[in-house]
Image: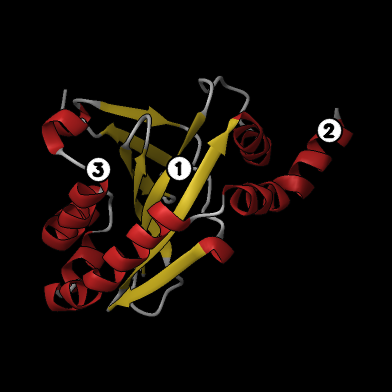
């Protein structure tokens, strides 16, 4: 077993995409950090599974919290895609290494008793370990272009947005936006049945 495989749950389904309208975005050179408050439940997960054509089983889902999405340019000037996601959830905090090139989504749990507040831990990882984590996610070229000063410059704004999202979110509006985004997919899936 490779050291990177220890404690990692691998999925053949990509993570549920962020609801862009619910995100605040902060550019840091070749990467952009999106801050989003997420609500995830079985209905949102089912719509995502239908969209991905996934017929496997995903455990029941009922969680919420701040997510930090790290998007970047796989090559200079390319469209930015998500490579890292930190889901600082209330019940099951975790982070993802996302590889659209390999269609893999690897999840690692965060242990609050050992690591402290998942949101603070995640922001510290972005501040101090972003190039290493991007390389682990398969984005070595992007990692080599990250300038620590660019990341450091935006982190106070990221922190402000993250705490604002944590303490000032509107659950009903967030859930409605997530379901509206999934509605065409869910409708198409039910029509096809």
Which residue is labeled 2 in the image? 190
Secondary structure category for the residue under label 2: helix
Cα separation, mark 2 vs mark 1, equals 25 Å
Disc count in the image? Answer: 3
Q: Residue at x 41, y 44 (%)?
A: 65
Return the mark for residue 167: none
Q: Quadrant of residue 150?
A: bottom left
Classed neighbour count for the residue bearing mark 2: other residues with Cα under 10 Å, few (<14), some (14–19), many (≥20): few
Return the mark for residue 103: 1
Q: Earlier in the sequence, mark 2 or mark 1?
A: 1
In this view of the protein, which residue sits in the foreground, 62 or 51? Answer: 62
Residue 48: image x %, image y %?
62, 39
Q: Earlier in the sequence, mark 1 or mark 3?
A: 1
Secondary structure category for the residue under label 3: helix
Q: Earlier in the sequence, mark 3 or mark 2?
A: 3
Quarter of the image with the N terminus is top left
Name above or below for residue 182 compared with residue 164.
above
Return the mark for residue 118: 3
Is 79 on the left or on the right of 148, as rendered? right
Secondary structure category for the residue under label 1: loop
């Amino acid at each position: 077993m490779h050291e990177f495989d220890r404690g990692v749950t691998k999925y053949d389904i990509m993570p549920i995409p962020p609801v862009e309208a619910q995100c605040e975005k902060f550019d840091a050179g070749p990467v952009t950090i999106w801050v989003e408050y997420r609500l995830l439940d079985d209905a949102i997960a089912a719509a995502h599974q239908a969209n991905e054509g996934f017929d496997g089983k995903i455990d029941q889902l009922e969680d919420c919290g701040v997510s930090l999405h790290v998007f970047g340019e796989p090559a200079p000037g390319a469209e930015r895609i998500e490579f890292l996601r930190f889901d600082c959830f209330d019940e099951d905090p975790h982070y993802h290494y996302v590889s659209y090139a390999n269609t893999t989504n690897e999840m690692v749990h965060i242990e609050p008793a050992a690591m402290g507040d998942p949101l603070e831990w995640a922001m510290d990882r972005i501040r101090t370990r972003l190039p290493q984590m991007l390389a682990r996610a398969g984005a070595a070229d992007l990692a080599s272009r990250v300038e620590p000063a660019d990341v450091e410059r935006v982190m106070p704004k990221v922190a402000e947005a993250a705490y604002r999202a944590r303490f000032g979110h509107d659950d009903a509006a967030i859930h409605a936006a997530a379901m509206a985004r999934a509605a065409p997919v869910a409708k198409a899936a039910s029509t096809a049945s």
